[in-house]
Image (tube, grey):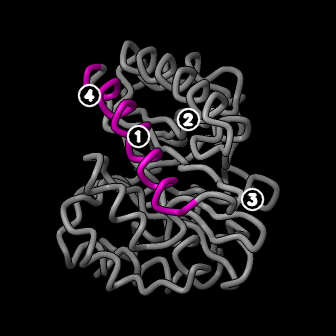
Amino acid sequence: MEKWLSMWSIGPDVNEETWKRIKAAGFVGIEVWGEHDNIFETVSKANTIGLKTGCHLPFSDLNLADDNDEKADKAVGMLTQLLEKLGTFGCEHAVLHGGKDSGKRDWNVVLDKMAARLSKLQKTAAAAQVTLLLENLIPEADQRVVASNFADWQYLLGKTGLHACLDVGHLRIAGGNLKSALAQLGERLYAVHYSENDGVSDLHLMAEKDTSYLRELLAMLRKIQYSGTFTFEVHPSHYTWKDILNVASEVQQHEEED
């Protein structure tokens, strides 16, 4: 299992000292945030100091499940260009959000169109030697969210050949069972996004004093011999990069003692 850090959690501007501390804390890679302006500068810097890189693809204005097919196809085109460029920079993986649907169309039609768009992106990613991941999301009251239902998520993964990025915070809010999810995903699981919440809102918290849940989660992943990425994705307004590195170092110390 590889310990990674989301650049959303620490921001786009990182100085030399912070880069050194990230590496010293045992992080193997960083996941750049697609909404940041300087993602390729960040990827290049990470590469020079020996950190692996991945990308959480942008999603704010890119809805692959848009009711308007023209808009959804435009999103595919923009993501295609980004995946191709990420490949030239040696990014290992890219995390994708499925998008949202208004609820006006037959859901099976939405899923079929999503599968076709995801398959197209998968071909681009494979050619660029980037592993494309679909992340589980959170249900919403006013819109249908792709991959917020576990069965639909599994269907799309199987239909398209994408791998899974399991966000354990999202899973908790959706009422999912972690042990069951790990068993059902099996070898398709490539990445885990870690944060904690109250089971209601996606707070992206991190336990600074009581790290028992985090240690239990890591133990569960070790038990199934999980060898993928484990990314700290916690809210930047709540924690500094020092807070994150301190917790990561504390958990690593507990693991070594165990």
Viewer-nearest residue: 83 or 32: 83
Indicate whether 33 appears above or below 16.
Answer: below
Q: Identify the residue position indicated by label 3 in the image.
A: 239
Instruction: Label 2, secondary structure: give it.
Output: strand
The percent position of residue 122, horizontal first and vertical second, equals 33, 34
* Among numbered discs 2 and 3, the one appearing first in the sequence: 2
Disc nearest the viewer among 2 and 4: 4
Res. 164 image quadrant: bottom left
* Amino acid found under the numbered disc labelled 1: Leu
Type of secondary structure dominating the magenta stretch: helix
> Which mark identifies residue 32?
2
* Amino acid found under the numbered disc labelled 4: Ala
The percent position of residue 135, horizontal first and vertical second, equals 47, 56
* Among numbered discs 2 and 1, the one appearing first in the sequence: 2
Res. 71 image quadrant: top right
Which residues fall within the magenta stretch? 106-127
Which quarter of the rendering shows the C terminus? bottom left
Q: Identify the residue position indicated by label 4 in the image.
A: 126
| Residue at 36 percent of width and 56 percent of height | 156
Q: Identify the residue position indicated by label 1 in the image.
A: 118
